[in-house]
């Protein structure tokens, strides 16, 4: 019965309900530029709107911060809820992995700790950092 279906909340893994560690913009043929959120708990990837906060669902006040202007890994920041989640541009570097490179880009985490935004993404490999 379609009336009983409940949409999955933005930013939650449809398989385990976990928060995404990061999101990835793909460069694959036919889905060029599509954005997928990545769950570090169960490794599921699911499609999300390209410019939308994965923490609160807002499309207002979305911005990007990186260690360099042309960085392939950036922090997508939301002015509405003051949170951030990493976004990886696989369309520019096909070797990027949404979980491994989340851990491998701790310099960005260190820089973002100095800002007013809080990390909304969850990666069990970064617990305690």
Image (tube, grey):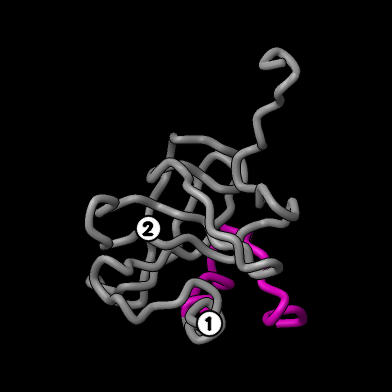
Residue at 71 percent across and 23 percent down: it is 5
Establish if 49 lies above or below 68: above
Label 2 CA crowd tier, 10 Å (few <14, some 14–19, many 20+): some
**Number of marks in picture:** 2
Q: Between residue 127 and residue 18, name the one nearer to us.
A: 18
Marker disc for residue 122: none
Q: Residue at x 60, y 40 (%)?
A: 10
**Can residue 102 be seen from the camera position used here?**
yes
Q: Above or below — where is 70 with respect to 29?
A: below
> Closer to us: mark 2 or mark 1?
1
Label at residue 100: 1
In magenta, the rendered stretch is 108-129
Q: Residue at x 55, y 39 (%)?
A: 80
Q: Kindly give the residue lying farthest to the front in the view shown.
A: 1
Q: Earlier in the sequence, mark 2 or mark 1?
A: 2
The span from disc 2 to disc 1 (Cα, nearest Å) is: 20 Å
Q: Quadrant of residue 122?
A: bottom right
Say which quadrant the N terminus sits in.
top right
Mark 2 = which residue?
64
- Helix, strand or loop status at disc 2: strand
Q: Quadrant of residue 65?
A: bottom left
Please rate how many residues cluster around mark 1, counting C-alpha atoms within 10 Å: few if below 14, some from 14 to 19, many from 20: few
Q: Residue at x 56, y 48 (%)?
A: 54
Location of residue 28 in the rendering, given as x and y in whole percent from the top left corner: 27, 61
- The location of residue 105, given as percent across then percent down, is 48, 82
């Amino acid at each position: 019965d379609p009336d009983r279906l409940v949409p999955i909340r933005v930013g939650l893994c449809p398989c385990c309900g976990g928060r995404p560690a990061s999101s990835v913009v793909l460069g694959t043929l036919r889905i060029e530029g599509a954005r997928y959120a990545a769950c570090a708990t169960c490794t599921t990837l699911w499609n999300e709107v390209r410019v939308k906060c994965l923490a609160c669902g807002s499309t207002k006040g979305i911005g990007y911060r990186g260690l360099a202007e042309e960085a392939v890994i950036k922090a997508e920041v939301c002015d509405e809820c003051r949170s951030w989640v990493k976004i990886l541009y696989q369309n520019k570097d096909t070797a990027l992995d949404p979980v491994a490179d989340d851990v491998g880009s701790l310099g960005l985490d260190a820089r973002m700790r100095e800002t007013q935004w809080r990390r909304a993404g969850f990666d069990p490999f970064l617990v305690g950092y």
